[in-house]
Amino acid sequence: MKDRVLNVLSHYMSRLHADMALRRAVAKVGIDSRLEDHRMYPQLAAALETSLRLFTSESLIDTAVGELREVLTPDEPSSVKVELRSEADMSLARQAARTLAEKMGARSFETQKFTTVVSELARNIVQYAKHGEIEITPLSDGMRGLRVRAVDQGPGIKNLQEILDGRYKSKTGLGKGIMGVRKMMDRFDIASDDQGTRIEVEMHL
Ligand SMILES: Nc1ncnc2c1ncn2[C@@H]1O[C@H](COP(=O)(O)OP(=O)(O)O)[C@@H](O)[C@H]1O
Ligand SMILES: [Mg+2]
């Protein structure tokens, strides 16, 4: 995204000025320097417009501002589904979690927490159910946040009550397994029987 913005700017000013203008606008609106947070795009466009006006002749300014706004249209992040069978799929789920959290403007510790949660759920599916899927959905109307649905048709969690009572200690989880997931998230629902397991969690931003 950074390159696309710089591209537009350098049609109207030198590359050096474009770099400076972008750096100044980034600092002014407080967006992360990789421009991951799409919600900040309108403010960023507005801040850059000021610089564009300094460098662009009257006759070109509308075109210039139009191009800039077009590039900086916030795209509504859409939900992502990852099928899980292997370690490689776990990485994909982790990556998808990170990308979506960043697009939703999660802070870095929130992104870290969310990525850990998705990792734990993905690991459990691959480890204990062999196969399943995780769907990550951005929440934006009313409540801003991220939802995860982790579903499998595995054998189910035999000792679920023991786990939820805190009597089970996770051996493999970095985020301390299911209880860690429950602690880290703002909403936690679990249903498990011999037909499989379904976990739904939300992190609110
Ligand atoms: N999706 C799942 N399907 C079947 N069993 C599961 C699933 N997830 C977790 N379990 C069972 O619940 C236990 C606790 O999981 P967890 O809290 O993640 O700790 P850990 O994976 O470190 O044992 C696991 O040891 C496993 O027996
Ligand atoms: Mg686990």
Image (tube, helix red, strand yellow):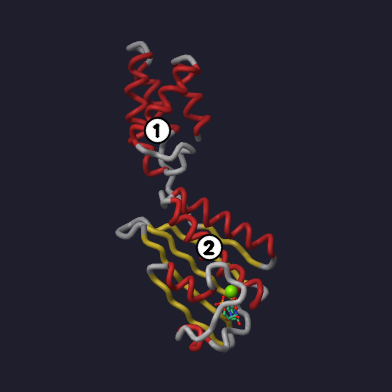
- The kind of secondary structure element at disc 1 is helix
- Determine the residue positioned at 43% across, 57% down: 110
Residue lying at the far left of the rendered structure = 142
Q: Amino acid under label 2?
A: Thr
User: In the image, residue 74 lies at what x, y percent?
Assistant: 41, 41
Above or below for 50 versus 35: above
User: In the image, residue 149 lies at what x, y percent?
Assistant: 50, 69
Q: Is residue 19 left or right of residue 50?
A: right
Q: Residue 96's quadrant in the figure? A: bottom right
Q: Residues within 10 Å of mark 2 (few under 14, many from 20)?
A: many
- The kind of secondary structure element at disc 2 is helix
Asked if disc 2 is less than 8 Å from ligand 2, the answer is: no
Q: Which mark is residue 91?
A: none
- Determine the residue positioned at 57% across, 88% down: 158
- Determine the residue positioned at 48% across, 76% down: 179
Quarter of image, ligand 2: bottom right
- Determine the residue positioned at 58% across, 81% down: 196
Which badge, 1 or 2, comes first in the chain's sequence?
1
Above or below for 126 versus 89: below
Q: Which mark is residue 116?
A: 2
Q: Are marks 1 and 2 in contact (CB under 8 Å)?
A: no
Q: Which residue is mark 1?
A: 26
Above or below for 77 versus 118: above
User: In the image, residue 25 lies at what x, y percent?
Assistant: 37, 29
Q: Amino acid under label 1?
A: Val
